[in-house]
Image: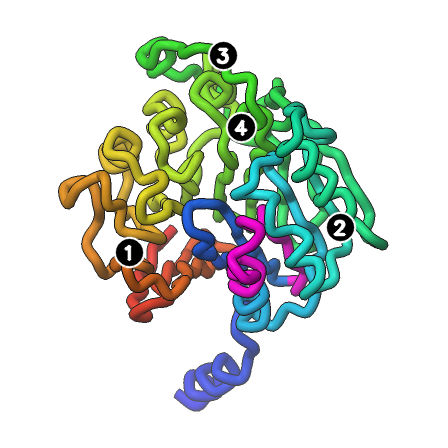
């Protein structure tokens, strides 16, 4: 009995297991995701929009402060559209950025794309630039961050444990070729022990299917960040149902993304337990939105930039929290 109580006391004195913490930041229908490794290193995926009185950069900086982060070790830009790369200069003015990671030069040209890409390059400053290709690893200490797609190409070799034939292939007809930066998105698979999170940026319909057809090169994931903010030009069942996520996070805006068809694909995915949304999707209607407790910003007229936070343990256990109301739910391995 004495040994039993000594064991309890000893366990209480042990430091809490460190978690992978992910903040899905509200940038009004763009993307900004802060990832903090158990090692303390940080990775930000995209920076939202420019302008708006530094709104998006301020929100990222606020999340970084909450997470105890004073610098960004790796900034990953999925592609060169204004809702993903626009906020880089403003963010770089607020926090040191050590490495700038992208798929290489922008594939769009013209006055606006050129201006956007030039502003991004000017922000590199003293940071190091890294152009990645499928199969590369982004060396965040404590995590396995594998590049799945980049510059229109995808991995050819399955990740560990994947590679089985996908019976869904052929059920979602191919669409017209997308020649925009969306199809060039840098997509990543983030692994921490038994936990897996996938983020494909704004990758579009045909390119997504290349990842899972004829064989599923990715395998199942725990959390799926809705591709392209939940727009139905992305997210066919062929990939979403093949990934079998337990939880989906939809980084939509009030009137951008969160379309009914894309939401229904996630909602009907085998094994899905919950969908969490950054905004109530106004145009999708009540039947294509989750209960309000799972929505960070339910009122389009009074948006306060509330985030959604995910904390994952190495054993695959993870908790999702709504920054608006502190509602949390834990998902067992």
What is the residue that sits farthest to the bottom in this orientation?
Answer: 2
- Disc 4: CA contacts within 10 A as few (<14), some (14-19) or many (>=20): many
Whether residues under marks 1 and 2 lie with C-beta atoms below 8 angstroms apart, the answer is no
Residue 190 colored in magenta in the image: no
Q: Does 99 appear above or below 240?
A: below
Mark closest to the chain's N terminus, 4 or 1: 4
Question: Can you tell which mark lies on residue 177?
Answer: 3
Q: Quadrant of residue 265?
A: top left
Q: Nearer the viewer, mark 1 or mark 3?
A: 1
Whether residues under marks 4 and 1 lie with C-beta atoms below 8 angstroms apart, the answer is no
Question: Can you tell which mark lies on residue 8?
Answer: none
Q: Name the side, left or right, on which 196 lies relative to 324.
A: right
Mark closest to the chain's N terminus, 2 or 4: 2
Mark closest to the chain's N terminus, 3 or 4: 3
What colouring does the structure picture have?
rainbow
Name the residue rendered at 56%, 77% in the picture: 15
């Amino acid at each position: 009995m004495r040994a039993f109580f000594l064991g309890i006391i000893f366990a209480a004195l042990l430091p809490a297991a460190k978690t992978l913490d992910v903040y899905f930041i509200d940038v009004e229908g763009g993307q900004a995701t802060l990832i903090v490794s158990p090692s303390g290193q940080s990775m930000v995926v995209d920076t939202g929009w420019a302008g708006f009185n530094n709104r998006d950069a301020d929100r990222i900086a606020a999340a970084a402060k909450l997470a105890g982060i004073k610098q960004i070790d790796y900034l990953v830009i999925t592609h060169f559209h204004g809702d993903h790369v626009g906020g880089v200069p403003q963010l770089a003015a607020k926090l040191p950025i050590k490495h700038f990671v992208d798929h290489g030069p922008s594939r769009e040209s013209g006055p606006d794309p050129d201006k956007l890409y030039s502003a991004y390059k000017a922000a590199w400053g003293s940071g190091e630039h890294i152009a990645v290709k499928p199969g590369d690893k982004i060396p965040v200490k404590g995590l396995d961050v594998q590049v799945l797609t980049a510059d229109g190409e995808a991995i050819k070799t399955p990740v560990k444990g994947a590679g089985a034939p996908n019976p869904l292939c052929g059920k979602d007809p191919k669409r017209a070729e997308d020649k925009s930066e969306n199809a060039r998105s840098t997509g990543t698979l983030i692994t921490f022990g038994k936990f897996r999170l996938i983020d494909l940026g704004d990758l579009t319909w045909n390119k997504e299917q290349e990842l899972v057809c004829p064989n599923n090169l990715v395998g199942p994931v725990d959390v799926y960040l809705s591709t392209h903010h939940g727009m139905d030009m992305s997210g066919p069942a062929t990939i979403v149902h093949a990934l079998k996520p337990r939880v989906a996070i939809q980084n939509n805006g009030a009137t951008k993304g969160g379309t009914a068809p894309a939401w229904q694909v996630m909602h009907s995915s085998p094994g899905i337990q919950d969908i969490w949304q950054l905004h109530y999707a106004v145009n999708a209607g009540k039947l294509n939105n989750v209960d309000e407790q799972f929505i960070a910003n339910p009122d389009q007229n009074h948006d306060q930039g509330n985030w959604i936070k995910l904390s994952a343990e190495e054993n695959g256990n993870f908790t999702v929290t709504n920054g608006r109301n502190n509602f949390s739910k834990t998902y067992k391995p």
